[in-house]
Amino acid sequence: MDNSKDLPTKANPLMEPIHHNERIYLASQRIHADYRRSHGGGGKYRDLKDFNRLIRSVEAFPLYLERGDIVELTRAEAGADLAPAFKATFGKPIMLISATFQAELIHHLDDELSKQMAVAASEQTAKQARLGKASLKDTIAAISMIGKIVAEVPGVKPAMVAAATLACIAENTGLALDTMRQTLPAEAPEAVGKLNASQIGKELGISAIAANRRLALLGFQRKPEGGDWELTEAGTTHGEAIPFTRNGHAGYQILWNQSVIEVLREAV
């Protein structure tokens, strides 16, 4: 931020013309202050760092540096004559703009702002155009319905589905949904779904086959004839079925919480 904006103008060397290499310059702090006043407070460029970044984004910026119309200096590069200015910035780098070049730079900055606003407007229009003939309401309803279908898949987390649904709605409608996204809870560490049968067997000193058999005897899982292990309702207390695809085969893998280890030990 502009560390000197609260200093009185007369006591602030950054608000006064600066002589450097036989030319007269104005610090970007001074240009920034004038620009903010003429643009009702500066909008998104209230911060000096953002304003300097805007100056560097001007297409002809390299040419201005080459001509000496703009000079960027660090404390080590500057002479003793600029010591007061660096004192006001607490030693941070300074951007100097030629006093005769100020009007031209402001013109370019206005052009740059206009371009950025035009690009933003164009992107918004493009998002709205993607709706085609479908109404906004129908589009949101369709995406929400898809989100509900995905949420019903075992192993899918509601918070992740909600975040993806909001992102999809924003992308396809242009609606600003950042505020709603902020209400979503952060993903908590998973309490369920860490151990497979082999890992359980290793902790108990038995084989994976024996571990699966014990889990079945407790009623936590069942295996239909010719099928894979399925999680029972009782088993959901200690595990979850995670969907997977492998070598063209789709199915569910049961992963168990650490708590099932103690249950199995007590059941022996």
Image (cartoon, rainbow, N blue to C red):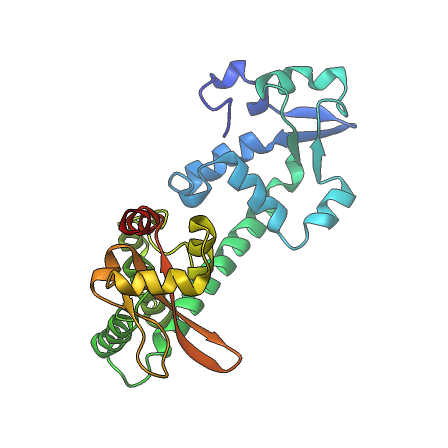
Q: Quadrant of residue 171?
A: bottom left
Left or right of 86 on screen, residue 244: left
Residue 227 in view: yes
Give above or below for 15 relative to 173. above
Count the numbered circles shown: 0
Q: Position of residue 37 (x, y in %)?
A: 42, 36
Q: Where is residue 161 in the image (x, y as percent from the top left)?
A: 31, 64
Q: Where is residue 124 in the image (x, y as percent from the top left)?
A: 39, 67
Left or right of 10 on screen, residue 59: right
- The residue positioned 54% from the left and 17% from the top of the image is 12
Give above or below for 132 relative to 167. below
222 vs 98, nearest the viewer: 222
Residue furthest bottom as drawn? 133
Q: Where is residue 93 in the image (x, y as percent from the top left)?
A: 65, 28
Q: Quadrant of residue 256?
A: bottom left
113 vs 122, nearest the viewer: 122
Left or right of 4 on screen, residue 142: left
69 vs 180, nearest the viewer: 180
Give above or below for 89 relative to 1. above
Q: In which quarter of the image is residue 193?
A: bottom left
- The residue positioned 57% from the left and 40% from the top of the image is 52
47 vs 84, nearest the viewer: 47
